[in-house]
Image (cartoon, rainbow, N blue to C red):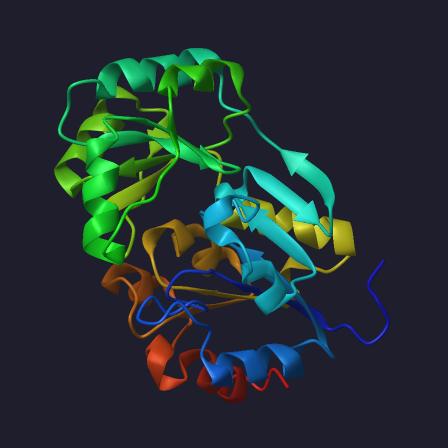
Amino acid sequence: MVEEGKKGIVSFDMDMTLLDHKDWQIPASAKKALEKLRARHYIVIATGRDMDAKYSEGLLEMVRPDAVIHLNGTKITVGGELIYEHRMDPGLVKGLLEFTEGKPFAMGLSMGAEDYFMNPQYVVRHDQVRFGRSDRNFQDPWKLLGLPVRAMAYIGGEAGARQVEKAFPQLKLPMFASRKGADVVEKEASKAEGLKRVCEYFGVPFGQTVAFGDSMNDYEVIRAAGVGVAMGNGDEELKRAADYVTANIEDDGVWNACVALHLF
């Protein structure tokens, strides 16, 4: 049942939509927008991250969402409650690790405080370029065969991502906005499907949703939501699919869109 006073759902991608990678902060104007939105809307994070992993520590407290769509819709939580999850078949995980071994890219995931990647040297290189350091806690990637794998991460260039898609046609690898990596998810999984499940949970019609995003893992939800908003710093293909294109994250993009769309 819809909470009294709530009009709809506004969902936000995390990286470079709410979280600016220049300083790893949420812009003050976006924080202000979140607080004003709460009176009339449920706030949802829809991300490729596992927001419960160590690399997302502190982010939930910054946003205080009503629900989280993790890992491109393969895990959904409301408060501390897991309301949905989909796990990859261990045979698929095994095939991905075997395919990646010896290739010039990495494949794996971070779970909790541990990192499980085939070819971890490419993750280290990526971290050093992006953060100036790498402090991963690498474990044997073959341990993933006994762990709950919902989605994986690819670290490398776009050519390698297309190789993976060709070898595994049941998968899609939407590239990060940086074009230096991609999410690895089964084709039926998406933030859009996750948002539909959140709508069912809260009793909100899907047409009363607004979705913000910047990269290609936001494509389905931007197209499907009642209103899809692409960030100015976002992927050009995503912008073409959006109902509204706002300013860059550092130029008050979230706030400006909320004002333009009369969300508060």
Residue 16 rendering spot, x and y as whole percentages:
37, 65
Front residue of this view, candidates 65 and 53: 53
Numbered circles on residues, count: 0
Q: What residue is drawn where x is 58% and y is 29%?
A: 86
Q: What residue is drawn where x is 32% and y is 78%?
A: 248
Q: What residue is drawn where x is 53% and y is 37%?
A: 112
Q: Quadrant of residue 84?
A: top right
Residue 187 rendering spot, x and y as whole percentages:
42, 33
Front residue of this view, candidates 229 and 86: 86
Query: Would you say residue 115 is visible in this rendering?
Result: yes
Specify the quadrant that holds the C terminus. bottom right
Q: What residue is drawn where x is 52% and y is 43%?
A: 53
Q: Quadrant of residue 5?
A: bottom right
Residue 17 rendering spot, x and y as whole percentages:
41, 67
The correct choice, above or below, for 218 with respect to 82 in the image is below
Front residue of this view, candidates 237 and 111: 111
Residue 146 rendering spot, x and y as whole percentages:
52, 14
Specify the quadrant that holds the N terminus. bottom right
Does 202 sit left or right of 72 as displayed?
A: right
Query: Would you say residue 247 is visible in this rendering?
Result: no
The correct choice, above or below, for 238 with respect to 197 in the image is below
